[in-house]
Image (cartoon, rainbow, N blue to C red):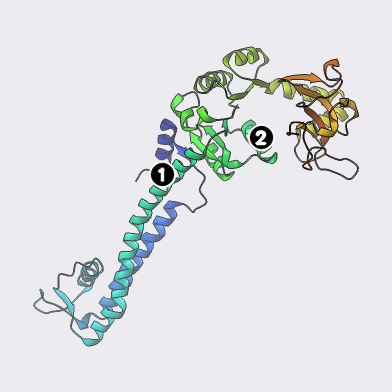
Amino acid sequence: MPDQSSDLSQRQVRGQLALPESTVSPWWQLGRRLLLAFGILAATVMIVFLDRDAYADNNDPTGQVGLIDSIYYTTVTLSTTGYGDIAPVEAHARMINAFIITPLRIAFLVLLIGTTLEVLASQGREMFRNARWRKNMTSHVVVIGYGTKGRAAVDTLVNNGHDREHIVVVDPGGSALQEAHADGLAVVTGDATRRDVLRRAGVADARQVIITTDRDDTNVLATLTVRQLNPDVWIVAAVREQENVALMRQSGANSVITSSDAVGRLLGLSSLSPTLGSVMEDLLTYGEGLEVAERDLLVTEVGKQPQTLPDQVIAVVRDERVYRYFDPVVTQLARGDRLIVVRPAKELPWAPRPGTHDEQLSTDDA
């Protein structure tokens, strides 16, 4: 049988899809069944050997049955071969065969057949799960790279209501495969710069692709490949160096995040003003204190100024363009606008969260 490392290497080469499993290890299942089979063999041999005087060997002039004969009789009996050269001759031995050894034979056969059927069923079940996943997987999110940045991006998506079943991870590492499966995510193990790997991840039908590997050159090549497979997908990519931002945008990324510069600026702010640094960290931490969010404009907010809303509006999205809250273009909010706001992560009696109570949106039909 192939070991786990060789199986993993095949997944890496082929870009094979692996859905998360909730079952126990197949090696543990196989080992348990082998132990049960050997247990049945050993128990039957012991029964026959201890009662050997009640058996006759037709091929032995003395008719005696020894340990080797007991093992032989057990194997041909449990496998239903039954040559008939050794047979029980006493009445109690025949009763033991009828009511003890026969059930053991049935259990032995069921165990062997069950193991075979389980292997075939598991393969068929895996093929069915993969086919069903591919059929239903549209408008999903593909995350390339499941390191620290990739896990944080997935956590943010999930914490904001995105379904884990509509997130696919692409990563060549075995540790990433295990961690993503532990997080309940589907994984395509392989090189994200290869077309066949990205096709198996469903990039052509994806709504968004997040690229977070640790190498800028890999991110650029992955962005180019993704853009060729899906010209309309929204690509968010991370780069380590600021000088590579323009190259990443030219490669097709819609949004580029400079990880090293962002961390450096946060460190500098925390050094100059610890309180400002703590506020920035609060904005980047999900579920506590403040959060940055995008929401639709409500009907009751149409015609108002951004500064007069309960939320702290910092930008307005209008006609796919972003305007700062103080820009004269958005002095009065209009139907179809979207707001970038700073609001409480959890609603408090004195700090409401408009847009989270099924209010009528300005985009709804009148």
Instruction: Please name the residue that numbered disc 2 is placed on.
Output: 152
Residue 344 vs residue 239, the one in the foreground: 344
The residue identified by callout 1 is 127
Badge 2 local density, few (<14 within 10 Å), some, or many (20+)? Answer: few
Q: Residue furthest left?
A: 61
Circle 1 residues within 10 Å: few <14, some 14–19, many ≥20 = few
Q: Position of residue 345 (x, y in %)?
A: 80, 39
Q: Nearer the viewer, residue 258 or 39?
A: 258
- Viewed as shown, does residue 200 lie left or right of 298? left
Tag 2: amino acid: Ala
Q: Nearer the viewer, mark 1 or mark 2?
A: 1
Q: Quadrant of residue 185?
A: top right
> Viewed as shown, does residue 108 lie left or right of 184?
left
Identity of the residue drawn at 58% across and 30% down: 207
Marks 1 and 2 sit apart, C-alpha to C-alpha, by: 30 Å
Horizontally, residue 360 falls left or right of residue 227, namely right
Farthest-out residue, front = 366
- Which quarter of the figure is the C terminus placed in? top right
Relative to 268, 25 lies left or right: left
User: Which comes sooner in the sequence, label 1 or label 2?
Assistant: 1
- Quarter of the view holding residue 52: bottom left
Where does the image place residue 334, in percent across and percent down from the top left?
Answer: 81, 24
Q: In front here: 214 or 61?
A: 214
